[in-house]
Amino acid sequence: MKNLLGKKILIALVVLTIWQARTFGQPAYSQGFDSNGSQSPNGPANLVSEGWTFRNQSDNHLANAGWFDGDAFNQTPQAGSSCLYTASAQTIPFLQGGALSNWAILPEIPNQSAGSILTFFLFGSSAALGDQVLQVRFSPTGGTATGSNSASVGDFTQLLASFNTSPAWLQATVTLPGPGRIALRQMDPFVSNFPNGGVSLKVDSLTIASEATSPCGISLPQPGETVTWTQANSPYDVCSQLTIPRQGTVIVEPGVTISVQSGGPQLVIEGRLIAHGTSVSPIDFVGENFSIIDPPFEVSGGTLDMRFATVSARIQSKYGATILAADCDIPATGTPSLPTRCRHWIPTG
């Protein structure tokens, strides 16, 4: 009885250790953009009442605040029921071009300090439609002035980050320098709505915390960065659409399980996912295996490199993606035909 009790305590400690390893800092601020409110002259009403400030300082701009409730324009959010949305078609005249400068200034955040992490998801037009970026700017004085024209930045003198957009949700992470006000600024030096409809972008799942957070508690790299998914933190349960961005790399340790929940969540690989298991510690890819439209794993122009992996989920490639596999176990029943899913499949054993 004593030995059994000791084993139970040991198991409890192991579970607690794993849970603590996956727990992130509590956000000082969180905005899911699910209840933005009706559109007012100053922007989405509920966000304005919360302390957000919206300004349209684009050239030849229309008489609106530049940012809108995504659901009002039938925009698909990254999570939840809506998102924050802006588009040149709604902010400048259709037949007139000009520079875009649409500001979304966050409320004053209590306890914001040096090292605080701003995290959000970004979705927007491809580079083929314009030179749109989303800037994250910082006002060290706490002032909220943005000047009077498309080139002005006012109190927001510090550029913390600038993100290109792509038609897939990308997680953006920015380290804040200290107390002050934060602004998101849609910017394009020149855009025209005619003939291709201009540019647009969406923001969702925004938090400010003492350390980086992500939906589902899964670390994702920024372009040029590498993160490791460890066996200690396994399983990695994908609970919403997550994207490994172009030039971002995820290395998966042997013994890890990557599981995509059914009903819409998806892991999109635009960068690289390197999953090299071993014969005794394979890596498991788990998810439904019948969806063609929204497969649980989608390699979208990126690379999926698997060794000693067990695949029981549909993996779909598109846009010139590369899928490499060696010594992998693919169940003989219940999965789509291998050539359909993995055109670049390289079996070696």
Image: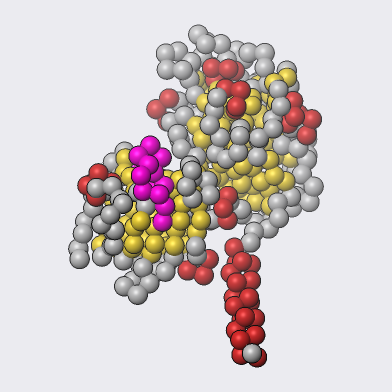
Classify residue 17 as left or right of residue 171.
Answer: right
The magenta stretch spans residue 241:
no
Decide which of 19, 250 is in the foreground and name it. Answer: 19
Secondary structure mostly seen in magenta is loop
Q: Position of residue 334 (x, y in %)?
A: 31, 51
Q: Is residue 296 above or below residue 155?
A: below
Please say which color scheme the image uses: secondary structure
Decide which of 154, 90 is in the foreground and name it. Answer: 90
Q: Residue furthest left?
A: 348
Q: Quadrant of residue 41?
A: top right
Q: Position of residue 42 (x, y in %)?
A: 73, 22
Magenta residues span 286-303
Res. 88 visible in picture = yes
Q: How many marks?
A: 0
**Image quarter (top left, top right, bottom left or bottom right) of the C terminus:** bottom left
- Residue at the image position 57 percent from the left and 40 percent from the top: 79
**Image quarter (top left, top right, bottom left or bottom right) of the N terminus:** bottom right
- Residue at the image position 59 percent from the left and 18 percent from the top: 91
The magenta stretch spans residue 301:
yes
Res. 156 visible in picture = no
Classify residue 208 as left or right of residue 135.
Answer: right
Q: Residue furthest top?
A: 95
Classify residue 309 as left or right of residue 344.
Answer: right
